[in-house]
Amino acid sequence: MIKISPSLLSADFADLKNEVCDISSADMLHLDVMDGHFVPNITFGPPLIASIRKYTDLIFDVHLMISHPLKYIEAFAKAGSDIISVHLECDDNIDECISLIKKFGKKACVVINPDTEVELVFPYLDKIDMVLIMSVYPGFGGQSFIEDVLEKAEKIRKISDIDIEIDGGINDKTIKKAVKAGCNVLVAGTAVFGKENRSEAIEMLKNSGEEK
Ligand code: DX5
Ligand code: ZN
């Protein structure tokens, strides 16, 4: 069974309560946190996550695109995150980030950018709950899927049965390739929030991903 994690980045920020309720048929909610330093864009932080936490029981899949996650993990944990993802390319020590996330009882995930060698994540696979492969350069929604990254999923799947999430440019065509390569958690921003009927969009993605 694959899991769909719609990215709030493509939602209407003036109507977040309804946007969140509109995707209740999804498996998770992907929350893109950007600091304007690690990536050239700024989004939102713990207060916004805490505000929407009241309106949904969905698993909060928090993707930290920030240079210094160590400083903020506690705040994101307390805001209601369930999974906290830190980039391998960030400026903090990854083992310390993983330990801190676990100390707060949350699931830990390590993210790798398109240009980062997949082997660099191998030493962490036994210590984390999920690995996130970026299929676009982080910072913005609506970019095109970078197919070359699928090889990373294949390499991880060969050695581990860990959850493999993929993020960026997922639609009803690219989702098939991602699942075939071994990904089982699919982030979709524009392919869900860009559509009029969100539950239909989630269902369509799920069906395409699971189709043989
Ligand atoms: C990009 C973000 C993604 C983005 C995905 O930095 O991490 O989660 O919102 O958006 P789509 O699905 O539109 O590529
Ligand atoms: Zn993301």
Image: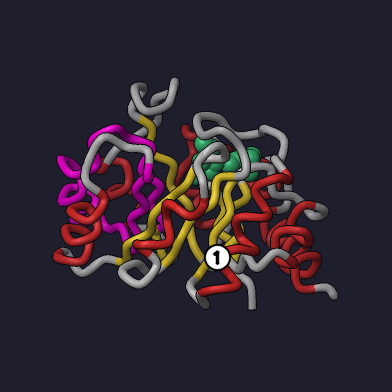
Q: Quadrant of residue 142?
A: top right
Q: Secondary structure at mark 1?
A: helix
Q: Quadrant of residue 37?
A: top left
Q: Would residue 110 be found to the left or right of residue 206 on screen?
A: left
Q: Quadrant of residue 146?
A: top right
Viewer-side residue, 199 vs 160: 160
Q: Is residue 26 visible?
A: no
Q: Is mark 1 within 8 Å of ligand 2?
A: no
Instruction: Find out whether residue 199 is within the magenta segment.
Output: no
The segment highlighted magenta reads 61-88
Q: Would residue 155 be found to the left or right of residue 66 on screen?
A: right
Q: Position of residue 22 (x, y in %)?
A: 57, 56
> Which residue is depicted at the point 82% across and 53% down?
173
Viewer-side residue, 70 vs 122: 122
Q: Would residue 104 be found to the left or right of residue 27 on screen?
A: left
Instruction: Find out whether residue 82 is within the magenta segment.
Output: yes
- Ligand 1: image quarter: top right
Quarter containing the C terminus: bottom right
Question: Which residue is under mark 1?
Answer: 156
